[in-house]
Structures are given as structure tokens and as C-alpha cells.
Image (cartoon, helix red, strand yellow):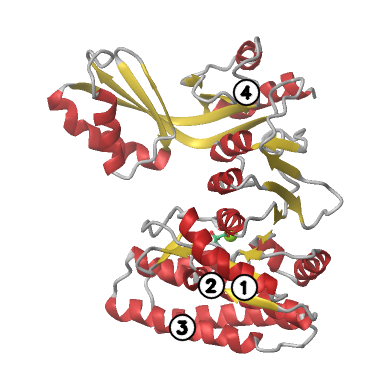
Amino acid sequence: MKFGGSCLKNVDGLRQLVELTSAEKECTIVVSAVSGVTDTIMQTITGRLSEKKIASLTSTLRERHVAILSEASSGLLGSGEKDVDGLLKNLERLLYGIYYTGELTPRMRALVLSIGERLSARLVSSVLESHGIRSKVFESDSLGIVTNSNYESATADLPQTKRIAGKKILAALKSGRVPVVTGFFGRDPRGHVTLLGRNGTDYSASVVAYAVGARRLIIWKDVDGFLTADPSIVPQAKLIDEISYDEAAELSYFGAEVLHPKAVDPARLGNIGLRIMNIANRSSKGTLITSSKRETTGVVKSVSCLKDLGILRVYVTGGGYTSGTISSISGHLGMEGVNIISATTSQTCISFLLGIEDLDRSAEALSKLISVGLDKVEKERNVALLCAVGEGLGRTRGIAAKVFGAVSDVGVNIGMMSAGASTVAYHFTVSMKDLQTAARSVHRVFFGE
Ligand code: ASP
Ligand code: MG
């Protein structure tokens, strides 16, 4: 079971955690930092440090964790308080290191930001113990969640992690203890802490589930699960009870914030049934994600969206019949660290869909190629992406007409589109101002009012 930061921020959430854990015959827990903690640490180290700021951060974190701990364990603090102090002492030393040297490398940042999860794991373990549940804290670096050396957004080495971490967790389970594993980070082959990306604990949980050969993974959140649309854009959005791994991957990559996009892969590889559930609404069954490619009668299961994008149009004469054009252009973008969300290509122009924050940088990088065969680069801002997802969509007649018809019915123009790249998704761009109108219209066609 994975518990997000919002499940740990107060006594209610922790009470549920204890209840849910004692109801399972055997389970492993993976935790995020208490909500807001990663952001608070991040803000402190991003600005200019001072002795005052360091003291204020450590005391804020202490107060927050000790208050939750003492309330959730009815005063039976156990070793929890001492553990919290030990970790905060470490944090303080690291922060002084940064303050004195004025240096903050990505590796150091990863180490500092991992403290949030180390604190919450101690907190959870201590609360479990105070309720008579034996537990053991595992910190993901010493545990052996092995990753590559991308310090900000690392990917796990699943076979190595299974061999090293899986074994230790299974041993703890065998001895009757509930393993409590820190989410969000791992370590590279040389032992340095790596982060798995913001909100990466969903991914950690999936990696851990794979490592122990779990059959089920429950991700506890403060929302019910995957919905048929983003409820802030389409208020009629309804809960989806079941989706496939591919559908979940497309939806989370293209805007559904309920699950981290990287969490799908380990679950798929381990054939683990992944369920998203709401800790504040346990009567809802949430969304189950499995390998079953169930098609619904309407085929489309959800309409997701991404905001704040831009399009980069790169004009190349003869681009369509010259080999290596796309690879050279995308290679340049890759070197700039730009993530390409989608790309479409024609004889004269290659269009890239990018995050708005990457647009100017990308245009700049490519302008260097103008002397060597590239004609011009154009930028378009205020772009949003809509994505219709459903198993069977690539095989069923009339779905594209229905999706695109719904957009045209409300007088909205489609910019770029991609159909066929994925067999379970169509995605296309509209201008930001038209996003809500277009999303509601597509949703209405498939799900009614
Ligand atoms: N605490 C980390 C973050 O806020 C990881 C997570 O919450 O999953 O990004
Ligand atoms: Mg978080």
C-alpha cells in the first residue's frame, strides 16, 4: 500500500493507515513525505540560505512531525521523537554545508530532499508500533532501490532492485514485521541518492511491489481514482472503475494527475493489479488498473488534457525525403534537455509539442541549424492538448469522427493531431481559450450531460 502525503498530514489519515494495515494479512507500506514538506525544503534551499532560515526550517519540520506523532500515537512517542531529531540534525548539517560552500549540486539537492520521506517513514512506523503493530523502516538508498544516475528523475533498475531490496523486504515480512519504505528516492550504482521525480512515490510503490513479487498494489490518495475527465474543466466527470495499463499510462502522461506516469511500467511487468483508492472515501471502490483490455461500448473511457504548451514548427526544405532530419533536430532538443511531448511531420515541416517553459530555449537551440539546411523556426503559444483514451479506439470505426466532430460542432479549431501512434489514444491541440469548450463537447458526446 502506498500512502501519499495527504494521507499522513493528520490523525484521521494515520488512523485509517493503522486500520488498513492491521486488516491485511501481510503488507508493505511505501510513504511520501507529509504533504507540503518536500515543497518547504525545496523553497528553503532554492533561496539564499541563512542561519535563521536553517533554524526555522528544522523547527517547523520538528513541530509538524512531533505534533502528528504524539496525537496519532496517543502520547506513546516511543523512539519516534528521537528518530525525528536525529534526521533533523543530519538535515541541519547538510544545510550548513550548502550555506558555507554556497554550492548546491543536483546530487546534494537529491540527498536533502530525501529527508521528507525519511521523516514520514519514521513517523508511520512509530505510529504503527504504538498500536502494537511491529514494523521496520527501510530507507531506499540503504535498502537498495537501485536506479540510474539521473539525480532529478531517475529510473529504477528492476532486476537489481528485486535482488537487493526485494530480499530484505521479504525477510522483514517473514519475521512478522510491516516494512515501511521511503518513497521518492533511490540510489545509483555508486550509492548516491537519486530522486525519482516530483510526486514519484507512486513509482516507488510500483517498484517495491515488483521487487517483492506482490499481486496487488493499493495507492491511497485523496481522490477517488481516474475520472472520465478533469473535474475542474468538466464538472460532470465520473469515476472509471477499471482501465488497462496502456490506458492508465496514456492518461497519466497526458494530464491525469491521479497517478505518476512512471508507476505503470513496473506494475505491468510484474502483472500487479494496481488500485487507486480514496482514503477519505473508503466506500468507493476506486479505479482498478490491470492487463485486461476491456472495451466499453462507447470505447472512449476518458478525456484528459494538458495545459500551458507550445508548438515549435521547424521548416526544412526536402525534410520529408532527406534521411536523418528528424533525428538531428530532436537530437539538438535532447541535448538541451527538452522533453518532446509529441511530434508530427510532413514534407516541409516538423512540428514539436513542448511545455511552454521549453519553447524559447528550443527555438534558440535550433536557430543554430539555419545555416545548415533548416529554413525557419516558428513558435506558437497558448496551446493545450486534449487526449481521448480507450482500448479499442484504434480498431473501432467512427470514433475519430465522433471525437473530432464534437470539437468542430462547438466551432473549435484543431492544431496538431496524432492518431495511430498509440492504439488506445487520440491526442490533438486546441488553443488554451478553447480548451474547456472542446473538452466538454467531447465528454458530452461519449458520456452524455
Ligand atoms: N514528496 C515527494 C514530492 O512531493 C514525492 C511524492 O510526494 O510522491 O514530490
Ligand atoms: Mg507530494
- Toward which corner of the image does residue 315 lie, by quadrant? top left
Label 4 crowd bin: few (<14), some (14–19), many (20+), radius 10 Å = many
Residue positioned 65% across, 14% down in the render:
396
Q: Quick one: 136 or 97, which is closer to the camera?
A: 136
Which label's residue is closer to the chain start, 4 or 1? 1
Q: Secondary structure at mark 4?
A: helix
Q: Earlier in the sequence, mark 3 or mark 2?
A: 3
Marked residue nearer the N-terminal end (4 or 2)? 2
In this view, the mark in front (4 or 1): 1
**The quarter of the displayed image where residue 98 is located:** bottom left
Secondary structure state at the residue bearing disc 2: loop
> Which is closer to the viewer, label 4 or label 3?
3
Q: Nearer the viewer, residue 113 or 287?
A: 287
Mark 4 vs mark 2: give the one in front.
2
Which kind of residue does numbered mark 2 sit on?
Glu
Residue 173 visible from this viewpoint: yes
Q: Are marks 4 and 1 in contact (CB under 8 Å)?
A: no
How packed mark 1 is, by other alpha carbons closer than 10 Å (few <14, some 14-19, many 20 or more), is many
Give the numbered dot on residue 90.
3
Which percent across, then down, holds residue 221?
70, 55
Mark 3–mark 2 distance (CA, rounded to whole Å): 14 Å
> Residue flagged by tag 1: what amino acid is it?
Ala
Residue 151 rendering spot, x and y as whole percentages: 39, 60
Q: Secondary structure at mark 3?
A: helix
The residue that mark 4 highlights is 438
